[in-house]
Amino acid sequence: MTGAAALLRGALRLLRSGRRRTLLAAAGVLVAGAMAGAALTVSVGLGSGFDRSAERADLPDVVARFADQPPERIRARITALPNVAAYAPRTEIANVRLRAGGESTRRGSLQLVDTTARRGYAIVAGRDLPRTGGNTREALVEQGLARTWGLEVGDTIEVGRAGPVRIVGVSIAPDNVAFPLATAPRVYLSGTALAREFGGELRVNQALVWTHDRSRTDVTLQQARATTYGVGNLRFVTRTGTRLIIDQAAGVVVALLVAFSLVALIAATTMLAAQAATEVGRRLAVIGVQRALGVPRGAVAGEQALSAGIVGLVAGGIGVTLGALLVRGPSGDLLAALNETPPGSALLLPLAGLTVLLGLIAAVAAGWPAWRAAGRPPVALLRGGGLAARAPRRRAGGPGRAGFLGLGARLALARPGRAGATVVVLAASGGVILLMLGLASLLTALRDDPTAVGTRYALTVTAPAGGAAAVRRVPGVADAGTRVETRGVDSFALGEPVKLTTFGGDVGRFVNPPLADGRRVQGTGEVEIGTGLSTALGLGVGGTLAVQLQSGAELRLRVVGTVRALQDDGRVAFARSDRLLAADPSLTPDLAVRLERGADRAVVAARLAAIGATPTNVAGATTSNRSFLDTLATVLRAVALLDGLVCLYALVQALALTARERRPTLALLRAQGAGTGTVLRVLLGAGLVLALPGALAAFALQRLVFAPLVAQLAAGYADLGTAASPAAVAAVTAGFVLFAVVAAGWVARRVVAEPPVHGLREG
Amino acid sequence: MADASRPTPPRTVRPAHGPVGRRAPGGRARRRAVLVAVALLALVAGILVGRTTASSGPDRADAGSTLAVTLRDPTGSGALQPAPGEPLRDRTELAGTGAPPRPGRTLGVIAQLTDTHVRDTASPARIPFLDRLGTPFTAVFRPQEPLTLQTLAAATRTVNALRPDLTLVTGDLTDNSQENELDAAIGALRGGTVRPFDARSLQGADNADPFFYRPDVDPPRRPGLLDRARAPFRAPGLRGPVAVLPGNHDVLVGGEVRATPGLRATAVGAERLVTPDGSFARSVPREQAAAQESVNRLLAAGDLPGTTAPVRPDPRRRLLSGEQVVARLARAGLAGERAGRADAVRDVGTGVRVVLLDDVPRGGSDTGAVDAAQLAFLDRALTTGGDRWILVAVHAPLQRTPQGRAIRDRLARAPRVLATVGGDTHHDRVRPVRTAAGGYWSITTSALADWPQQGRALRVRATAGGGALLETHKLDTAPDGLADTARELAYLDAQGGRPDGNAGTPDDRNVRLYRAPPR
């Protein structure tokens, strides 16, 4: 205990002896802790948001939607299925007029709830509809609606023909994004009370199903498909499918923010370690004195480690808390937009763990170099020696052939470990910036550009005189070919709509959505189907798709691949035209037109119109997602900007350390008459030698690691071409150079403010 | 006309008696020789015991018995797991007053298999396409239907382990009264190489219809199952005496329709109806009997209104008449034959008589029911058994049989009728029938075609005071990869035995059924 107490006393003495430096170091740790805390808050909040919210809301494993049915019929069918733990019937009435607090919409979704059954939502304010049914004058509103319209428990909302009802609770269910991202706000009334009041039985059009074993939901669904006779317009959505739908809307951003958080954590750790090691560098003289006085090596290192650990723990803790508080609001808003709940107290333990980790990192980062330094002869330390033995110093007093920029570069590279760490931080941050810019562009493209969703043609035209050949000759047209698009339903009365798009010849010339399974269409009679259709029909590679066409004819095609297609909820199929035209000769082909890279669609459309072809634009993502995609793109660009500030901080830190270590060199330069401009050039050289490799590594990291990883993590519905554009790469490189200039200017001002004689005394 | 079976010798184990503890005279060499001989004997005995154990499991008598172990779904997830067996429960509704009498000696052991529905799934004469019309039709298709022969063979292995004095097969051995189905089923019952049917046209991955389970692509995925199901295999066959009664599916197409020239041509033809015309679907009456009649007319006409698929024509799909079915079963030694019917009497030992009454109408629906000659046969069988307890085996429960009342009246007058044993309903049910003569137990047993895919063991015992006790318990099929898969699929089937409650209640399965002495 005595040894530990002495160690603690020594550590505190160390901290007190250089209060200003301690405060500076604490500030650095605090910033790193804030970054890490923010990163962890975002990661935990978003990373586990769906599962956490789904558990809290008791989200069903399967939701079946169908045309109105007698409840007994549905109950009999569902209770006969294997693996069914519970079932709740529900009636959804769409396009109901809602009015409250001066706001109104005609797109409300009225949910009539069987109050005796499980609900599938969580109550976040007020109370639930009572199990006994309550009365028809009470309602729940979804959180998105309450937030957007400023509704609270006790307010009144007018619900279609039901008239004004009192809001008794606010609910949340992560089976869709929240209003207004979802266009139809949900209001819940007691179906039980309604049926009682009108003395009848409500027909139902939804069934919420909970299974005993979620991993065997596919078996339950298979049996459900086999017993759906007489039930029209049937659609199944599984909990996994719901997650996919949410991911489709926000998965790209969620994955990105989580990735960013991890990178920020790595950057914070690197910065913290560098900070602690620098502090030891500053205290070399003190260590030398201690060793000269016979203080044991372990005690010296222990004091350093403990003092850094205390700073890491206290400042890190404050930083982590600040970071968490800082992002709690935006993170909560994003979660609310996704109908997900914040982690709440579940976050406390990870944050505490992170604080301890920061303290440990600081202790190790300071203890290890102190241990190494304390092993050197005291005289070398007292003379101003470094942390490690070095090769004989080259003269650094003059600029040499490369000038002052080259001198700066040599000064920065003289500490290869620190230089490497700075480059790593810059590369990681730069990689994330590039990724976010790429993603923002992709989201914008998803909104407007069909090629982003696997459709390679941007226009369709009616065939002009001269047919496809005439269209191909138009400048800006890369390719044109016949296309037949029609809608049908599956032949077996499951009521699944199918959008069938066929092409004359190679399908891949015009569509290439990413393959989820199997292979591309290569011949007549083969088809690629969207994953939505695959899920609905339980149809996989090797199976047969049978489509009832509008003419009444049936078309059968062998499934060779499933593709991740965004359009029409993935209920799409791509094939060659031969079989379709044989089955229904009345269908008229048009021409799909693929544009040359960089060609302006409007210009090409005008040229096509001029030769007698009537062009039609091919749409991008579904319109309901447009505003959300815009929001997400803006969020991504803002995060990229914030990440840029991390790069600036890293550069300032690295240059400040270099300037501190090379104080005698810079003082000698100034003593020889060098002005602020010369010092600036030296420091700029040091900054550039870090910034430019950092930019290069960032580009490589984004291209080779981040982009493929995010494409895998994210929705997977689109061909995520997240590789940064040359413009983005140029912008990031220019930004890094600018940061180097700013950092060099900042540090140069501080260097020039100090009399040269102070630095010369250290030499 | 009694066709008495050979009594089975008593299976008692005689305790070993002999001189022990006395040292044999002679020198050390002799003693060593004796020790060596004992060691060798022990070794040989050990090997023999080891072989027996390895080949037949821990206890031959208990193999497949649900008294020891059975299969359950403890989590409700649809996954079956071995679970403790169900003990016998006493049912004393017909025991008279007082405590149940003490069980006495065993008079006979009988096994029952029923409703195996061996099925040529691709047959053009089948009607699975009606499933999609829903009410009023009940489901015809079963996901496990390519495995009916493997299930039957696994059931025979369980029955063989029981070593019954007689095995009853109470009807619906086949599904569609086709020659190829009957030949395959007879093969599985007699033993030898069995060649199952090809189910790929209905359940292959290239069938686009999601109403049918396609094991290569649908969960639970069992890639290659159809190929394995089609592979010929060697069935052990039933080892003891066997008596088969035909069921309505053995003598009528789909269990309902008498074969017509049009239907006969369809059965051996090259096209199968896949999707009926919308107009046909719309014209089907909602009332069940009328709907069935409408389909019967459609099938009888041999007309296939709707989308068809080609099938390989097979003359062995010939539709058999009731007389032809009984004749073939008799030729195979599996049934008696009396004027085209499988009526028979089998005496088991000196204490039990089994009367087999072929109660299936031959004309479809309610026509061609049990005739006067059969009633006379029944009268004779019930009155000539002496002190034997009588079990009456039928296909359909008597309350469902045309002229069943006449039969029930006769049973009510017979003092030594212990039970009726039937199938057809695919449900396990045991209920008492109280009569002036003391009553009898009505037992129906679930199908091998549907969950729970079990047979039934019936053990008749005397009780003190002149009464009788019928101990009955269910028999699981013996472990077999394909039969186990069939059971898994049967359990999952949402239109099958599980949701319909075919396994009944514990009072319908493993029970001791007491019967008071004759009045």
Image (cartoon, coloured by chain):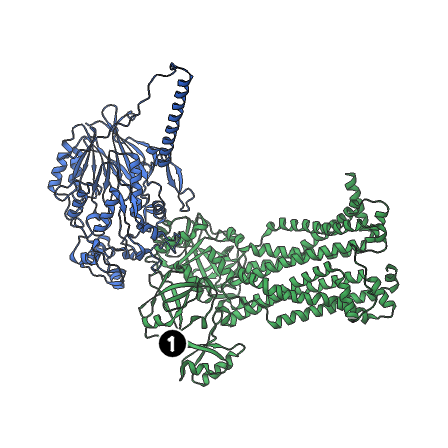
**Residue A91 percent location from the top left of the image:** 41, 57
Check the residue under mark 1 and report the chain it is in: A
Judged from this view, the residue extending furthest toward the bottom is: A610
- For the residue pair B142 and B29, the one nearer the viewer reads as B29
Amino acid identity at mark 1: Pro
- For the residue pair A609 and A45, the one nearer the viewer reads as A609
Q: Residue drawn 76% across and 61% down?
A: A414
Q: Is residue B266 visible?
A: yes
**Residue A680 percent location from the top left of the image:** 79, 69
B440 vs A535, left or right, is: left
Q: Is residue A575 above or below residue B256?
A: below
Q: Is residue B177 visible?
A: no
Q: Is residue B108 above or below residue B264?
A: above
A496 vs A474, left or right, is: left
A455 vs A554, left or right, is: right
Q: Is residue A386 above or below residue B422?
A: below
Q: Which residue is mark 1?
A: A589
Q: Is residue A535 above or below residue B50?
A: below
The C terminus of chain A, quarter of image: bottom right
Q: Which chain is green?
A: A
Give neighbour class at mark 1: few <14, some 14-19, many 20+ (Cα, 10 Å): some
- For the residue pair A427 and B29, the one nearer the viewer reads as B29
**Residue A196 percent location from the top left of the image:** 39, 52
Q: Which chain is blue?
A: B
**Residue B260 percent location from the top left of the image:** 16, 55
The N terminus of chain A, quarter of image: top right
> Secondary structure under badge 1?
loop
